[in-house]
Amino acid sequence: MRTAYTSDQIRAAEAALMARLPEGTLMARAAAGLASVCAGMLTASAGKVYGSRVTLLIGSGDNGGDALYAGARLARRGARVVAVLAGSRAPPGGRAALLGAGGRVVAYEEALARDLIIEADLVVDGLVGIGGAGALREPYATLARLCADAHRVVAVDVPSGVDASSGRVDGPAVRAHVTVTFGAYKNGLLIDPGASHAGRVELVDIGLGPYLPDPDVVALTGPDVADLLPRPIEETDKYRRGVVGIVAGSDRFTGAAVLCVAGALRAGVGMVRFASTAEPVRYVRTRWPEAVTTVLDGTEPDPVGKIGRVQAWVLGPGMGTDERAHALARAVLATDEPVIVDADGVTLAARDPSLLRRSAPTVITPHAGELSRLLGVPRDRIEARKLEHARRAAAELGVTVLLKGMTTLVAEEDRPVRVNTTGTPWLATGGTGDVLSGIIGALLSAGLPGYEAASCGAYLHGRAALLAVHGGAEAGAEGPIAALDVAEALPEAIRTL
């Protein structure tokens, strides 16, 4: 499991550790790790460090010092290192170390005149560290924009312009190919939009571990998910493996029904009980004969009783938002079983918040637009501050929130927010969310709590998508996928955990 922390948590841990070490020890450790990563990148691209052109972008904080000391190490190996001062001051010890190793220090104006960023083999971003907040000021903002044209960029601890605690980006920000972070992951390296600026993240151990508190954010790894997934045993039958009731689809959106059932079946559910109007039922019967189907015409006094007993429900994909759908949603949410509410179900809940006032476990899976309607907050504000609003929704609504996006967040009150790091931009296609709902429903019916079911479901969904875009392998050429491809790749995604 990868654990991440806020800036305040990191600084407190650093202070506790520094009190026990000789002055400068932590910076020396950080600089050594940073220099090692930079040397590896130069060797991979040019075959050597000697003669390589390295430009350091230096602010006045500790990460500027880290960059200068790392630059001194590279200069001693023969690299041509130039430090660009973004202001009038630079950490004095680091500046002296670089000059003593044969590096040079130039002012911001000279760097622009000589194209030192664009022509460098490697640019090291040491402008703003984890204490930075808000939009970058000049000349930092201009230097961050110029990094977009650099060959390779390494960010020190966190890309400048990215809020380390939340992932917010309020203006120009460095887009790094690699971020070398010290001691522990920062929230902003895992959560978009900051995560998209970080590139590959390399963690350098500087000894903070014993001084860190409980994490603020966590990301499950493959072994974590493998440990959580339910496994059938010898005496298992289909009922013990989980029976999920799926209420989805309509005459207009028949595909949502087919895809949601696909997600549940391919995720390993014991049985699917599917209910909808006649047309989606016909499609599900044809594509998935394993599903037990029920036609609902809207006149049933007890639609839940007609569907039969289940251990969990999936409610919403493609079911519509008319009065019939609202009545059916109210009937399902009045049960005592866990429910995952998605798509049209979320829209109905935004119109009638009383639907979510229940004692049984509830998972909702909105994208930013749907969450904006639930919270009454503009969509762009949610997209800029995903961590804040996922937490707020979990607390205010009393549910487990899976906020969809390139880095999906799973929030539950009084728990660390979980970030899903699997997936691919190819997942941005119609119907993939319906598959995800089916996966989570299957896991809920097998007995996983909402927090675990949502986290594992998101991980499997992203992993299956990666297998699908690579044609069954985890690396190599990519190609477009459709939602059903994701469902079909789920068994392999589970087998390879």
Image (cartoon, rainbow, N blue to C red):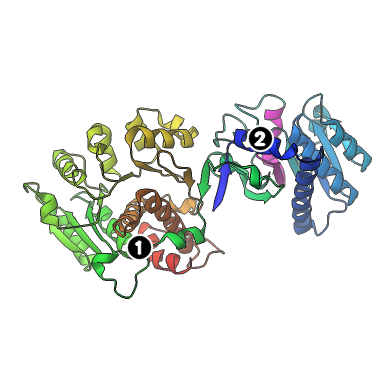
Indicate the amino acid at tag 2: Arg
Earlier sequence position, callout 1 versus callout 2? 2
Numbered tag placed on residue 11 in the rendering:
2
The reply to whether residue 142 is visible in this rendering is yes
Residue lying at 44% horizontally and 42% vertically, measured from the top left? 415
Q: Residues within 10 Å of mark 1 (few under 14, many from 20)?
A: many
Q: Does residue 195 appear left or right of residue 439 in this picture?
A: right
The reply to whether residue 162 is visible in this rendering is no
Q: Secondary structure at mark 2?
A: helix
**How far from the left and from the top, in percent, is residue 110?**
84, 30
Q: Residues within 10 Å of mark 2 (few under 14, many from 20)?
A: some
Q: Secondary structure at mark 1?
A: loop
Q: Are marks 1 and 2 in contact (CB under 8 Å)?
A: no
Dividing the picture into quarters, in which one does residue 135 lie?
Answer: top right
Residue 53 covered by magenta stretch: no
Dividing the picture into quarters, in which one does residue 349 lie?
Answer: top left
**How far from the left and from the top, in percent, is residue 21?**
78, 41
Q: Residue furthest bottom?
A: 234
Residue 152 covered by magenta stretch: yes
Indicate the amino acid at tag 1: Ala
Query: Is residue 197 shown above or below 455?
Result: above
Query: Is residue 450 shown above or below 158?
Result: below
**How far from the left and from the top, in percent, is residue 312?**
25, 54
In depth, the one of 293 and 448 nearer the eye is 448
From the image, tell me which residue sits under label 1.
267
Q: Does residue 167 appear left or right of residue 368 in this picture?
A: right
**How far from the left and from the top, in percent, is residue 164?**
60, 36
Query: Which region shows up in magenta?
Result: 140-162
Q: Nearer the viewer, mark 1 or mark 2?
A: 2
In depth, the one of 482 and 208 nearer the eye is 208
Q: Does residue 410 appear left or right of residue 232 in this picture?
A: right
